[in-house]
C-alpha cells in the first residue's frame, strides 16, 4: 500500500532563501517474498514560497532568527505545522555556507521540524544538487549527451560535468551576480574582493551598463574557459574557489551547456540592468551573447530554484549478508555519500587513492564511499582495489558500500592494510547515489539495516 509523506525543503543561499512543501508517494517495489525496497513513485508540489533575500546581520552573518521567521511564515501559508512534517532537507549553499554562524543556523533549523537531512552544501555537493534539480542529469541520461551544467548564483558558479546521467566531476568559480552591488542612486556599495585584481571598480563610484559590462565580460571568459570554449589563462585559476580545490579541467569534447541559478533567468530574458541592484542582469546578457550559447545549450527545468531540496526520502532496506564490520560504533546517521564510478574503480591504486582522497575531502564530515565493485573478481583485482581505497581514506573512519556481492573479500583485504583501531564497515548489495545520505543500524542477523536518504530535487516530479 502506498504511503504519503509531507516533505519540506529549505535552501539558504548567498542571495536568496526559498522553501517548498511536497507530498511524496512511497511504495514498496519489491515482491512479497523479498526484502522491502521503498521508492518514491510520485511527487506533487503543495506549496512554493516566494523568493526571499537571505537575511543577514550587518554585512557578514546569516540572521538565524530571520531564517526561522521565514520558515514559520511559509509553514503558516502552506497550512502545515511542524508535527505534520515527515521528512525534508535543510541545505545552506553558496557563500552563506562560509559564514561563521552557518552551523548555528543549521542546528536551529534542524531542530525546527521533522527528521531532516541537514547539510552545509560545499561546492561539490551544491554542484550535484543543482545539476539534478535543473534536470541536467535526466537530460544527459535520456539523450546520451555530455552536459556541463552551470549554476550561476549570487556569489559563485557551481559546475558539474555529466555523462550518461552521472556527475563525473565538479568545480566552483567565483562568478556571480552579487559580486558587484549598487543602491537606488546607482552608487556602488560593494565590490567583491575576488574582483580586486580584475577591475578598477570602487565603492562610491556610479554604476552604469558601460561601467559594469567589462567586469561581466571577464567573468564570462572564465566560464568559457571552464567549458573548453576558450584558451585557458591564469584567470581560470584566479577565479576558482579555494574550497573546490584545483581549477576545473575543461571537457575534452563538445558538451551541451546547461544553466540554472538566478543569473540564468537573465540569459534569454532582457532585464532592466537596475532591477536587482547588482551585476546579474548584465552578466546574464553577456552569457547569452557568448560562446557558451552559440552551440547547443539549455536552460534548466528549474533555474533559481534548482537547488531547492524537495525532500529527504527515507528508503529502508538491508545490506547484503557479506558484511565486514570492525570497531564501528553503530548506529551511524547522516553519512553523506561520495561516489566512485565503474570506470574510476579500475584506476591503478595510486590514482584511485588520490581520487578517493579528493572525493572524501569535499565532504565536511565522515562519509560513506559508494562504488559498483566487480562481479566474481580475481584476487589481484580485489587486492588492487583494497590498496587504493585504504590509502585514499587517509586515517578517516572507513565506510564502504558496494553494489556487487564482494564486501567480505574486499573488507578482509582492506583490514590487512588499515590500522587495527580504524572504524571500518564494508557492505554490499547497496546502490547509492551522489547527494544521498546513509544511516547504518545495528546488525540484523548477518546483515545491517540501512536507511538511504535520497535528496529529491524536482519538487513537481
Image (cartoon, rainbow, N blue to C red):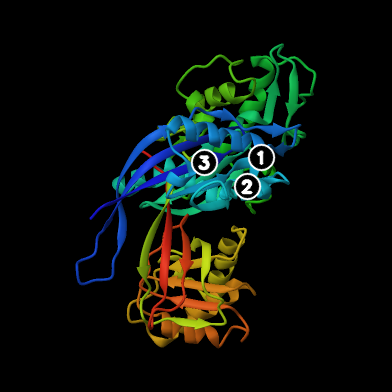
Q: Determine which of the numbered discs, if any, sits on residue 108 in the image.
A: 2
First-in-chain label (2 vs 3)? 3
Q: Quadrant of the N terminus?
A: bottom left
Distance CA(mark 1)–CA(mark 3): 13 Å
Q: Secondary structure at mark 1?
A: helix
Residue 276 found in image quarter: top right
In contact (CB < 8 Å): disc 2 and disc 1: yes
Gap between marks 2 and 1, in whole Å? Answer: 8 Å
- Single out the residue that lies furthest toward the top: 185
Q: How many marks?
A: 3
Quadrant showing the C terminus:
top left
Q: Against 45, is 282 above or below?
A: above
- Observer-nearest residue: 116 or 431? 116
Give coordinates of residue 131: x percent, y percent.
Answer: 45, 44
Q: Nearer the viewer, mark 1 or mark 3?
A: 1
- Would you name the residue on which mark 1 appears? 64
Q: Residue at x 40, y 66 (%)?
A: 342
Precedes in sequence: disc 1 or disc 3:
3
> x%, y% of residue 81?
47, 40
Q: Nearer the viewer, residue 84 or 238?
A: 84
Q: Is residue 230 visible?
A: no
Query: Residue at left 74%, top 37%?
Result: 60
Q: Residue 175 location in percent, x, y?
A: 62, 36
Circles 1 and 3, Cβ within 8 Å, touching? The answer is: no
The numbered dot on residue 10 is 3
Question: Spatial distance from mark 2 to mark 3, Cα to Cα?
Answer: 13 Å
At horizontal 49% and vertical 81% (from top left) the residue drawn is: 325
Dot 3 falls on a residue whose secondary structure is strand
Amino acid at each position: 500500500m502506498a504511503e504519503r509523506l509531507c516533505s519540506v525543503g529549505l535552501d539558504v543561499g548567498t542571495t536568496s532563501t526559498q522553501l517548498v512543501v511536497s507530498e511524496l508517494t512511497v511504495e514498496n517495489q519489491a515482491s512479497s517474498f523479498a526484502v522491502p525496497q521503498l521508492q518514491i513513485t510520485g511527487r506533487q508540489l503543495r506549496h512554493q514560497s516566494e523568493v526571499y533575500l537571505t537575511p543577514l546581520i550587518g554585512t557578514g552573518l546569516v540572521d538565524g532568527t530571520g531564517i526561522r521567521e521565514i520558515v514559520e511564515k511559509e509553514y503558516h501559508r502552506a497550512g502545515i505545522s511542524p508535527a505534520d512534517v515527515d521528512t525534508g532537507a535543510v541545505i545552506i549553499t553558496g557563500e552563506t555556507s562560509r559564514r561563521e554562524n552557518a552551523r548555528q543556523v543549521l542546528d536551529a533549523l534542524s531542530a525546527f521540524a521533522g527528521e531532516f537531512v541537514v547539510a552545509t552544501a560545499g561546492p561539490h555537493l551544491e554542484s550535484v544538487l543543482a545539476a539534478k534539480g535543473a534536470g541536467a542529469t535526466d537530460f544527459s541520461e535520456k539523450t546520451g549527451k555530455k552536459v556541463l551544467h552551470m549554476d550561476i548564483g549570487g556569489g559563485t558558479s557551481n559546475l558539474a560535468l555529466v555523462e550518461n546521467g552521472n556527475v563525473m566531476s565538479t568545480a566552483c568559480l567565483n562568478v556571480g551576480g552579487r559580486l558587484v552591488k549598487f543602491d537606488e542612486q546607482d552608487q556602488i556599495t560593494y565590490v567583491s574582493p575576488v574582483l580586486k585584481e580584475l577591475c578598477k571598480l570602487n565603492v562610491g563610484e556610479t554604476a552604469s551598463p558601460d561601467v559594469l559590462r567589462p567586469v561581466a565580460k571577464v567573468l564570462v571568459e572564465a566560464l568559457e574557459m571552464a567549458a573548453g570554449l576558450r584558451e585557458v589563462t591564469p584567470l581560470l585559476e584566479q577565479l576558482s574557489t579555494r574550497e573546490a580545490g584545483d581549477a576545473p579541467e575543461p571537457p575534452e569534447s563538445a558538451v551541451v551547456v546547461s544553466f540554472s541559478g538566478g543569473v540564468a533567468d537573465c540569459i534569454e530574458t532582457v532585464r532592466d540592468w537596475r532591477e536587482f541592484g547588482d551585476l546579474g542582469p548584465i552578466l546574464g546578457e553577456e552569457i547569452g551573447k557568448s560562446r557558451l550559447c552559440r552551440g547547443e545549450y539549455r536552460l534548466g527545468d528549474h533555474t533559481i530554484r534548482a537547488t531547492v531540496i524537495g525532500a529527504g526520502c527515507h528508503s529502508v532496506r538491508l545490506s547484503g549478508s557479506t558484511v565486514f564490520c570492525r570497531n564501528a560504533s553503530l548506529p551511524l546517521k547522516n553519512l553523506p555519500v561520495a561516489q566512485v564510478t565503474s570506470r574510476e574503480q579500475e584506476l591503478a591504486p595510486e590514482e584511485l587513492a588520490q581520487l578517493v582522497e579528493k572525493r572524501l575531502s569535499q565532504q565536511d564530515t565522515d562519509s560513506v564511499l559508494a562504488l559498483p565493485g566487480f562481479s566474481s573478481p580475481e584476487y589481484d583485482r580485489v587486492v588492487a582495489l583494497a590498496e587504493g581505497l585504504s590509502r585514499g581514506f587517509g586515517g578517516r573512519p572507513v565506510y564502504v558500500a558496494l553494489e556487487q556481492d564482494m564486501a567480505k573479500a574486499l573488507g578482509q583485504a582492506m583490514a590487512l592494510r588499515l590500522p587495527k583501531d580504524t572504524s571500518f564497515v564494508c557492505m554490499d548489495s547497496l546502490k547509492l547515489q551522489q547527494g544521498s545520505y546513509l544511516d547504518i543500524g545495528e546488525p540484523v542477523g548477518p546483515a545491517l539495516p540501512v536507511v538511504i536518504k535520497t535528496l529529491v530535487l524536482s519538487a513537481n516530479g
